[in-house]
Image (cartoon, rainbow, N blue to C red):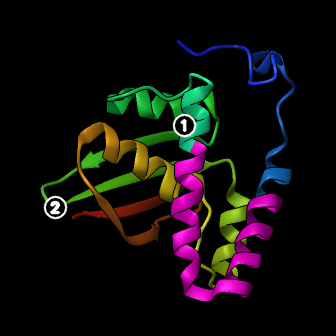
Amino acid sequence: MVCSRGIFGIDIMNKKGIDSLFVSALYYSINKAIYDVMGDGGKVLGRRASYEMIKLLKDLGFIKENMSNEEIKNLFVNTFGLSEDLNIVEEDKKVIFEVINPTLDLFLKKLMEENLKPYVCPFMYLLSEIYSVSNNCRLMLSDVVPETEEKVKLIFKKV
């Protein structure tokens, strides 16, 4: 059950949504700044940011222990609205997250145009960390494959 009151007693379920263009610009600028300052060392910052985000989302009641793949999908698609759909494909030595029509497509497009790594990205670290904890495994990003403009595959190795 998701609580409707934020940490300051604000009704977070009835707030007007934030435009995906603004969020894309925010994520892009954060990632660009991290890359400019830290280079490849920014991966550590992305992972750390996901831990802090998970902690906050748990405190707010959005994330629970041992979430099923369907609950994870529902969280990212219906609650957060980060994509139109999300498929979680489990294989022996890897997990593939198929992101269908991501709402932060401008953010992803800008990163690809500039050949920047997504250090702070809700799908890269937040999704993989929630999956890892719920499935008692560790994942390492192996590849990002934009199959079409509507579909991106995030491929993680089980380590």
Are the residues at dot 1 and dot 2 in contact (C-beta closer than 8 Å)?
A: no
Task: Residue 72: name its quadrant.
Answer: top left
Report the predominant secondary structure element of the magenta stretch. Answer: helix
Question: In the image shown, does 107 or 14 lie closer to the viewer?
Answer: 14
Question: In the image shown, does 107 or 31 lie closer to the viewer?
Answer: 31
The amino acid type, in three-letter code, at marker 1 is: Phe
Question: In the image shown, does 29 or 56 lie closer to the viewer?
Answer: 56
Query: Mark 2 highlights which residue?
Result: 93
- Where is residue 123 shown, x and y percent of the image? 52, 53
Specify whether 96 is left or right of 46. left
- Where is residue 119 shown, x and y percent of the image? 59, 69
First along the sequence among labels 1 and 2: 1
Q: Give the Cα separation between the discs numbered 1 and 2.
A: 24 Å
Eyeballing the image, is 159 above or below 143?
above
Callout 2: SS? loop
Callout 1: SS? helix
Eyeballing the image, is 49 above or below 90?
below
Q: Residues within 10 Å of mark 2 (few under 14, many from 20)?
A: few
Residue found at x 55% / y 85%: 40
Specify whether 89 is left or right of 55. left
Which range is magenta? 25-53
Specify whether 18 is left or right of 155. right
Residue found at x 17% / y 53%: 91
Q: How many marks?
A: 2
| Label ID, residue 76 | 1
